[in-house]
Image (cartoon, grey):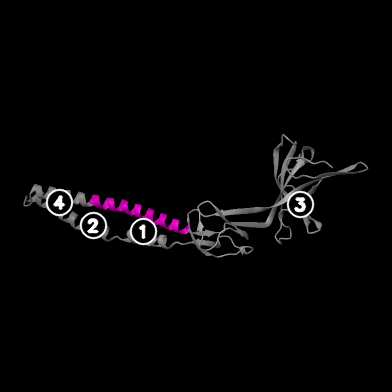
Amino acid sequence: MRVFVPVVLFVLIVCCGNVCAATFEGIVNPLHDIKLAMPIDGIVSKLFVKEGERVAKAEKILKLDDTLQILEVARRKEVYEDNSEPDANKKNIVILKALLDSSQKLFESTASVSHDEVTNLEMQYHTLKGKIDIAEAKKKQELIEYTIAREVLARYVLMSPIEGTITSIKIKEGEWAKTGEMVVSIVDKSLCVVDFNIEERYARTLKAGKTVSLRVREGDALTVKKGKIIFVSSVADRASALVKVKVEFENRNGSVIPGVIAQILF
């Protein structure tokens, strides 16, 4: 029996005649073990889940008090959708353009309108056109501000990024949630990964995508499961000369509890 550092590893070599078998052990980990935090500060107004409950992807987990942000969204919406001034300016510029065109024709044909009057109408037309252009640019800005307000409002609700089980809730209703501090953890153990550290002579026979047999602990017994290699390190650890290998296997029935030992046999 030989023990290798830096990770928990057990190698058992059994020889029978000219046949030798080496077994390497690793720890089973869930493929997804996610720690969630809020992107903004606020008071928790509602918890939608409890520890141990299953959640679907995009399901609500908790919500912060969003009263003020709802009002801000409503205000931004009203500002953006208020088109009374731009609509009035567009109607006025049509009238002003018709008046300018008729004045120019009268000035050119009969001179019954003075040049100063035509020039004054031209200035009014270009000024009003400038106001319309500014209003259109302002509307684009108001749309952006309205969109930002809605996006901020969406951040008041924490959604599950995966389907899994709530394993920990670190906050209660009425408490203050701080930006970046973990409030909920979710685990999806339907797919598990085992990290092995294997001697180079055995690791060189492995490649990503290859199917291997694992023995995984379930209660007092070791159950044989099919696993798929998803990673083989291209370099060995300098301290132990071991090669890191990752193997995943399905655990849809949840019979394997992450944290137990799994073995790979050569």
Depth check: 39 or 234 in front?
39
Which-is-in-front pick, marks 3 and 4? 3
Image vertical order of residue 13 relative to residue 106, above or below: above
* Badge 3 or badge 4: first in the primary sequence: 4
Q: Residue furthest right?
A: 17
Residue at position x 34%, y 61% in the image: 78
- Which residue matches tag 3? 261
Q: What is the three-letter code of the residue carrying label 3?
A: Ile
- Which residue matches tag 1? 76
Which-is-in-front pick, marks 2 and 3? 3
- Which residue matches tag 4? 121
Alpha-carbon distance for marks 3 and 4? 87 Å
48 sits to left or right of 264: left
Alpha-carbon distance for marks 1 and 4? 36 Å
Which-is-in-front pick, marks 2 and 4? 2
Image spot of residue 83 (x, y percent): 29, 60
Could you tell me what secondary structure mostly forms the magenta stretch? helix
Residue at position x 50%, y 63% in the image: 174
253 sits to left or right of 128: right
Image spot of residue 217 (x, y percent): 78, 55
